[in-house]
Amino acid sequence: MALKCGIVGLPNVGKSTLFNCLSSAKAQAANFPFCTIEPNLGVITVPDERLGKLAEIVHPGRIVPATCEIVDIAGLVKGASKGEGLGNKFLGNIRECDAIIHVVRCFEDDNIVREGGNAVNPVEDKEIIDTELQLKDLETIEAQLTKNQKIAASGNKDAKILVNVLETFKEVLEQGKNARSVTFENKEEQQAAHNLFLLTTKPVLYVCNVDENSAKEGNKYSRQIEQIAANEGAEAMIIAAKTEEDIASLESYEDKKLFLDELGLEESGVNRLIKKAYHLLNLQTFITAGEMEVKAWTFQKGWKAPQCAGVIHTDFEKGFIRAEVIKYEDYLKYGSEAAIREAGKLGIEGKDYVVQDGDIMHFRFNV
């Protein structure tokens, strides 16, 4: 599934350093604005401990993890909505993403240039990004309103629905709030809202880039962003991008584990970020396990069995008969498919079965 998250933020907040840690594609990282001009695209693997544990039982030829795409987008400056800096290009790149990873500087370093001055101010930095996105959305909405108000006045039902949606978004954006704070109960209104592809309707994860000493508990700056995120109903996390870069440079698992232990961390920030990005896109994983491979397959949360079968091959969905489902915990407990069958733990599910994260699936079909 070609869904992707865009890494955004002001210049020099650590976006490219973070991207380099996430992906084998190496973005240039330097201490000057607009270091990243073309968006860098990386396909990254989603850490999933379940695959390794299943492989210990099945002994497959290979393990194939799930993946998602991460885009490193050029830094934004105040006035981007009016074309300042790389504004129009930046905003266009965000529009192509399905979710936003918003990196906010939460560390002090006089040697790192900050747009508008060196004083660390994560709240102001966040608001600059928000304001520019909101202004661009208002521009989109006002253009649509001008076009559709006349059509609605003539009695067109669809235009009336759209105008109501546009006016609701406009009121919220003019209050300095993001469009994602609006919810519509009516399905027609929901569809009209979705078709606008507004920048501030995209789900967001705030990443507080802190210094190494704050990698575990955060600091006064990260706590400000975490509080704002909680008020918005958004997610936030702490990461020390420079430290993650040091961890990524280590070759052995043992060395990386030792480094993490010294910091008091059980898992690298990069792994936590990838998992959060995956869930931010509303994605989950089902698994196929056999002698050839143990493989993670990506699907949208809430999908039913035939839709998930179609992820493997369209013929599986067209000719779907049933799905044989094993729960991950049962696979670990009983140790083989034969023992699972004997224990009566193999589920036989039809077209209405909603697939759960971690389900081990085998599809029966006939085309």
Image (cartoon, rainbow, N blue to C red):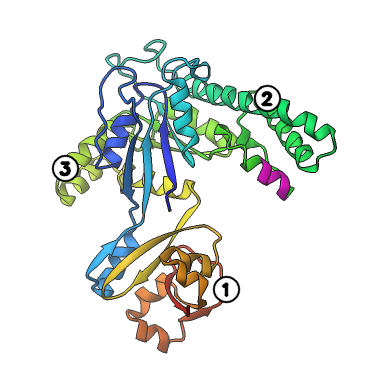
Q: What amino acid is labelled 2 in the image?
A: Glu
Residue sitting at x 46%, y 86% = 344
Residue to which mark 3 is pinned: 250
Q: Left or right: where does residue 315 sit relative to residue 59?
A: right
- Establish if 143 lies above or below 351: above
Q: CA distance from mark 2 to mark 3?
A: 51 Å
Residue sitting at x 32%, y 46% = 43
Horizontal and vertical percent for residue 34?
Answer: 34, 20
Q: Is residue 19 visible?
A: yes
Q: Is residue 172 visible?
A: no
Residue to which mark 2 is pinned: 142
Q: Left or right: where does residue 283 sit relative to residue 260?
A: right
The residue range painted magenta reads 187-192
Horizontal and vertical percent for residue 26?
Answer: 24, 35
Quarter of the rendering containing residue 109 = top left
Q: What amino acid is labelled 3 in the image?
A: Leu
